[in-house]
Image (cartoon, grey):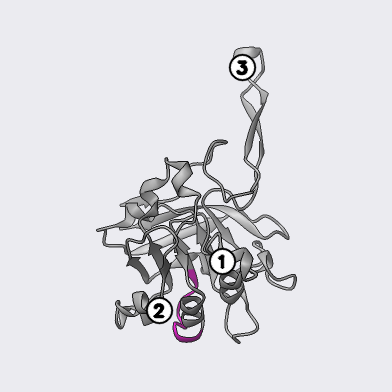
């Protein structure tokens, strides 16, 4: 059995504060005499359910088309269930609650509880929970099997502290040089609530191979 946990894309979907909205522009419509229904999409790559490549914050980092396809398949996903309030963080101690399982995981799915506000855009986009910088360092230095982190908010990073501290969490995770290990790619705006209570066998999250760019829309699928 398979479950999709990415959000659908549409022009009115919630976006990170200050990001441009998507546009769906009809090119042809049969009801207006066209030969087919065709559409042009104007899409900001960090809107909606998407994956960040290292190039997002590093000029020398790999672009979304350069990452190996196996980076997007996860055999040992682990759901981190922490019901957080506005402005709170997932911290190292939250990860340590999962004992030895945290060390074999190749994907951390961070459930903060904010999925429930998705349709309440005024709440969903404002000071949402995020991953702390200390937890990001812990993932990079101690959890050597982790290839990726997914979160149920618009960004892995606090919308207040991220800009203030030069997007430290993104840089810690995506850096493929400083920690002498592989970069940890980032999935944002994923509806992890659909994974709660499920026995997850495997996760697939294939991006579009957009040449030379920093991110891609993604459809994350759970195999149960």
Apparent side of residue 131 relative to residue 54 in the rendered image (left or right): left
Q: Examine the rendering and report whether any part of residue 87 can be seen.
A: yes
Looking at the figure, which quarter contains the C terminus? bottom left
Locate residue 203, reporting x and y percent: 41, 62
Q: Distance between the residues labelled 3 and 2?
A: 55 Å
State the residue at coordinates (46%, 82%): 138
What number is the disc on residue 161?
Answer: 1
Label 3 Cα crowd, 10 Å radius (few <14 / some 14-19 / many 20+): few
Badge 2 marks a residue whose secondary structure is helix
State the residue at coordinates (64%, 28%): 38
- Relative to residue 103, is residue 162 depicted above or below? above
Q: Look at the magenta stretch and give its main secondary structure.
A: loop
Q: What stretch is highlighted in magenta?
A: 141-148
Whether pointer 3 and pointer 2 mark residues with C-beta atoms closer than 8 Å, the reply is no
Looking at marks 2 and 1 on the same chain, the residue that comes earlier in the sequence is marked by 2
* Residue 105 image-quadrant placement: bottom left
What number is the disc on residue 92?
Answer: 2
What number is the disc on residue 30?
Answer: 3
Locate residue 85, reporting x and y percent: 37, 59
What number is the disc on residue 215?
Answer: none
* Residue 53 image-quadrant placement: bottom right
Disc nearest the viewer among 3 and 2: 2
Looking at marks 3 and 2 on the same chain, the residue that comes earlier in the sequence is marked by 3
């Amino acid at each position: 059995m398979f479950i999709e946990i990415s959000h659908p894309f549409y022009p009115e979907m919630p976006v990170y504060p200050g990001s441009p909205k998507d546009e769906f522009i009809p090119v042809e419509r049969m009801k207006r005499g066209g030969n087919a229904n065709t559409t042009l999409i104007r899409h900001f790559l960090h809107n909606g359910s998407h994956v960040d490549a290292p190039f997002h914050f590093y000029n020398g980092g790999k672009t979304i088309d350069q990452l190996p396809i196996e980076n997007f398949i996860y055999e040992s996903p682990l759901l981190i269930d922490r019901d957080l309030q506005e402005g709170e963080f997932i911290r190292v101690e939250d990860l340590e609650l999962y004992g030895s399982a945290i060390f074999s995981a190749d994907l951390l799915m961070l459930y903060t509880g904010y999925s429930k506000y998705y349709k309440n855009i005024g709440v969903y986009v404002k000071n949402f929970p995020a991953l702390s910088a200390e937890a990001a360092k812990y993932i990079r230095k101690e959890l050597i099997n982790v290839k990726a982190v997914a979160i149920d908010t618009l960004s892995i990073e606090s919308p207040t502290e991220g800009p203030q501290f030069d997007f430290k969490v993104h840089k810690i995770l995506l850096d493929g040089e400083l920690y002498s290990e592989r970069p940890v790619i980032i999935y944002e705006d994923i509806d992890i609530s659909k994974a709660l209570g499920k026995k997850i066998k495997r996760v697939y999250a294939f991006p579009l191979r957009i040449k030379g760019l920093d991110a891609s829309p993604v459809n994350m699928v759970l195999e149960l």
